[in-house]
Image: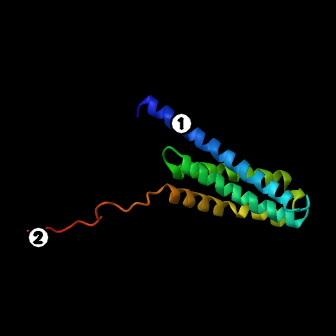
Amino acid sequence: MSFKRFAWLILGSLLAMSAAVVALVSVNLIGGTLASWLGFPPGGTGRLAWDLAWAIAGGTAAIATATYCAPAAPRRHALVCFAALSIAAVYAVAQLGGDFPSWFCAGLLLSLPLQGWLGMKWALKLKSPTIPPARPRYPRQDNA
């Protein structure tokens, strides 16, 4: 592989991960804005459930964005994004776990595999060609 190709792959991977961070932050901001528009109070069980749902949606969107924008090896990008989200979630629960109910912390950690799977599958489905192949995949027998 040439240096130019390698540099473009590295730059593309960094841009894909940056887009994943933007997707995560954007989805969470949308969830917070919608909560205030819908009149949710700043605290309470209802608001925490709402925020947990949007955190799960944000993680799914981040993994899907990293997978879809990857210049090569989209599954590896999904795995790296999943690992980063897992580290962030474990750190958040370890540092702030006492401030939140146990169901919120458990939901945040137990939803990580679902976020990874849904995000990767969604992006790979969007990336896959929807046009059927021009010729059949099975070999034809000639009539000779």
Q: What residue does disc 1 label?
A: 10
Res 139 label: none
Image coords of residue 42 (percent x, y): 91, 58
Image coords of residue 53 (percent x, y): 75, 63
Write down the quadrant of residue 107 in the picture. bottom right
Residue 25: tell me if it is visible: yes
Residue 82: tell me if it is visible: no
Report the residue at 55% width, 51% height from top.
68
Report the residue at 45% width, 29% height from top.
3
Q: Sequence-wise, which precedes: disc 1 or disc 2?
A: 1
Q: What is the distance, in whole Å, between disc 1 and disc 2 at their CAs?
A: 52 Å
Image coords of residue 94 (percent x, y): 81, 53
Report the residue at 78% width, 61% height from top.
52
Q: Residues within 10 Å of mark 2 (few under 14, many from 20)?
A: few
- As drawn, is 47 to the left or to the right of 31? right
- Residue at the extreme left: 144
Write down the quadrant of residue 19 in the picture. top right
Report the residue at 76% width, 54% height from top.
30
- As drawn, is 2 to the left or to the right of 114? left
Image quadrant containing the C terminus: bottom left
Q: Secondary structure at mark 2?
A: loop
**Relative height, residue 70 to residue 143 (above, below):** above
Image coords of residue 108 (percent x, y): 75, 60
Hey, what amino acid is under mark 1? Ile
The one of 17 and 85 positioned closer to us in this rendering: 17
Res 143 label: 2
- Residue at the extreme top: 3
Hey, what amino acid is under mark 2? Asn
